[in-house]
Amino acid sequence: MLRGAVLISVLITIGLMCCRAGSILIPMDQHQQNHLKAYGLAFHALKEGVYVDWLLNYRGGSFLIPYSEDVASECVVRGVSFEAVSDIRTNNILQEIASPSVNMNVVRLETAPRIAVYSIKNELIADETDAVITVLDYAEIPYTIIYDDEVLTDALASYDWLHLHHEDFTGQHWRFMWRESAILESKMQEATATRLGYSSVSQMKSEVAHKIKGFCAGGGYLFAMCSGAETFDIALAADGLEFLEGSFDDDAPDIQSKLDYSKTLAFENFTLEFGNSRRFSNINTGRPDFFESSKDFFRLFSFSAKWDIIPSMLTQDHEYVIKEFTGQTTSFLKTLVKPEALVLGENDEAGNVRYIYGELGKGHWTYYGGHDPEGSPGRRRGVTDLNLYPHSPGYRLILNNVLFPSAKKKKQKT
């Protein structure tokens, strides 16, 4: 009943607007009442076949959409701030952005990407949290959860964008039995590896990593967070080497000497952690703790919106100094980042990198350190309630990546 009443009120308001409005402007500055749901609104328009113009650096990276009653009503129902603007004002905005004297640009988004999330989350592991799943649900953006079976049977060909959660692509699940779901996860992964004919979980995960790398090289968009980013590169460098239980005491130095850094996406010259360490390698500059509090901040870099279009898209935000958040892999050691990778955000004083981007073949990849941009220290279960954080600048970076594949324009070379 409430939704129906809201829609009736919306339709009356829209009826008064429609004669004079040519576009809908969704501001993404401090005047937006729900930044995260605004991305879901843009995605909704794309799903309905309506293009969206992403106004880079204009009022926090606003969206401009051709006027329709559907889009306007969805804005109200979803709690997204919007302005109905005339054709004259629309042209004035576009002329302002086109001026060579301002660091702004327009990127047209044309199609909604097909989204997959690589995650073990299922009905048996209901408390397994993931920031991307959390924000996609909140923003009402559809996605499909896939895991090893789907990747190994080439299901990635059906998707445009893939997220890797806090996964261990080295298959060393025995090192993390302190996590509540680790025992169940390890049993499920061992059963899958045996069923598919692999000698170990690490062998299966190596094959999965190579399938995902092929997806990216073929034109896919890869987004990895937390240990999903770190261990993906370790698995690529190991290239099928066995990470067997006990190897960190006996065979680890031999594994270290055989790493091939030319096969990784982002990191080189890293050293594996031996013994009983909870860290995978020295890539991770923080403690492997999902729930440790931090008082530090990292900053986003500013890029030329007219020339460096892709990094400008990925760093759109209403804040450019963002609070740190921890995870199994909190952040990345700057000196280990490959020179061809582009740093988008870092804590320069601490010498760590939080947000990096690169290209592989026809595709693109982004790594983002940490577990949950709004995670609560000390909370070991449950999902962050984003109704409490609708303006989260840390979560906005995730959603920038979700819309990235929709862009018509590609990066221009300077």
Image (cartoon, rainbow, N blue to C red):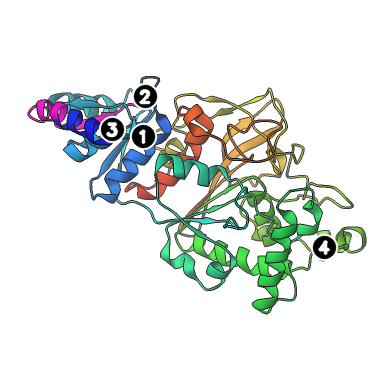
Q: Are marks 2 and 4 in contact (CB under 8 Å)?
A: no
Q: CA distance from mark 3 to mark 2?
A: 23 Å
Q: In what quadrant of the picture does the C terminus appear?
A: top left
**Amino acid of disc 3:** Leu
When asked about the image quadrant of residue 71, the answer is top left
Q: Look at 65% across and 29% down and name the residue there.
A: 347
Mark 1 surroundings: few (<14), some (14-19) or many (≥20) residues within 10 A: many
Q: Residue 2, labelled with which disc?
A: 3
Q: Earlier in the sequence, mark 3 or mark 1?
A: 3
User: Residue at the front extreme?
Assistant: 1
Q: Residue furthest top?
A: 30
Query: Does label 3 or label 4 sit earlier along the sequence?
Result: 3
Q: CA distance from mark 1 to mark 2?
A: 8 Å
Element marked by disc 4: helix
- Can you identify the residue that label 2 sits on? 32
Q: Secondary structure at mark 3?
A: helix
Q: Are marks 3 and 2 in contact (CB under 8 Å)?
A: no
Q: Which residue is mark 1?
A: 38
Q: Position of residue 351 (x, y in %)?
A: 71, 31
